[in-house]
Image: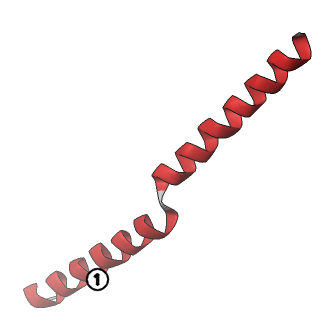
Amino acid sequence: FILIELVIVIAILAILAAVVVLVINPAEHMKLARDSTRMSDLQITHSLI
């Protein structure tokens, strides 16, 4: 491989990684997980009362 080919491949991989991060949106998934935990805790508390 020549240097330019390696730079092009690394750039393409970086673009793909950025797109994957934007599509997955890990912050939104963490928020949904925390919300479901809160709802579960509320249901348990409500059933105990």
Q: Residue at x 70, y 38 (%)?
A: 36
Position of 20 with respect to 40 (left or right) is: left
The one nearer the camera, 37 or 7, is 37
The one nearer the camera, 49 or 38, is 49
Q: Residue at x 91, y 17 (%)?
A: 47
Q: Quadrant of the N terminus?
A: bottom left
From what the image shows, is residue 32 above or below residue 11? above
- In the picture of the structure, the residue carrying the numbered disc 1 is 12
Identify which amino acid the numbered label 1 is placed on: Ile
User: Residue 30: x, y in percent?
Assistant: 54, 44
Crowding at dot 1, Cα within 10 Å, few <14 / some 14-19 / many 20+, comes out as few
Q: Residue at x 36, y 70 (%)?
A: 17
The one nearer the camera, 29 or 35, is 35
Position of 13 with respect to 4 (left or right) is: right
Q: Residue at x 62, y 41 (%)?
A: 33
Residue positioned most to the top: 49
From what the image shows, is residue 10 above or below residue 43? below
User: Residue 12: x, y in percent?
Assistant: 28, 83
**Residue 2, visible in the rendered structure:** no
Determine which quarter of the picture holds residue 38: top right
**Residue 13, visible in the rendered structure:** yes
Count of numbered circles in the view = 1
Residue positioned most to the left: 3
Position of 2 with respect to 47 (left or right) is: left
From what the image shows, is residue 43 above or below residue 17? above
User: Residue 24: x, y in percent?
Assistant: 51, 63
Q: Secondary structure at mark 1?
A: helix
Q: How is the image coloured?
A: secondary structure
The one nearer the camera, 7 or 1, is 7
From what the image shows, is residue 13 above or below residue 41? below
User: Residue 27: x, y in percent?
Assistant: 46, 50
Determine which quarter of the picture holds residue 49: top right
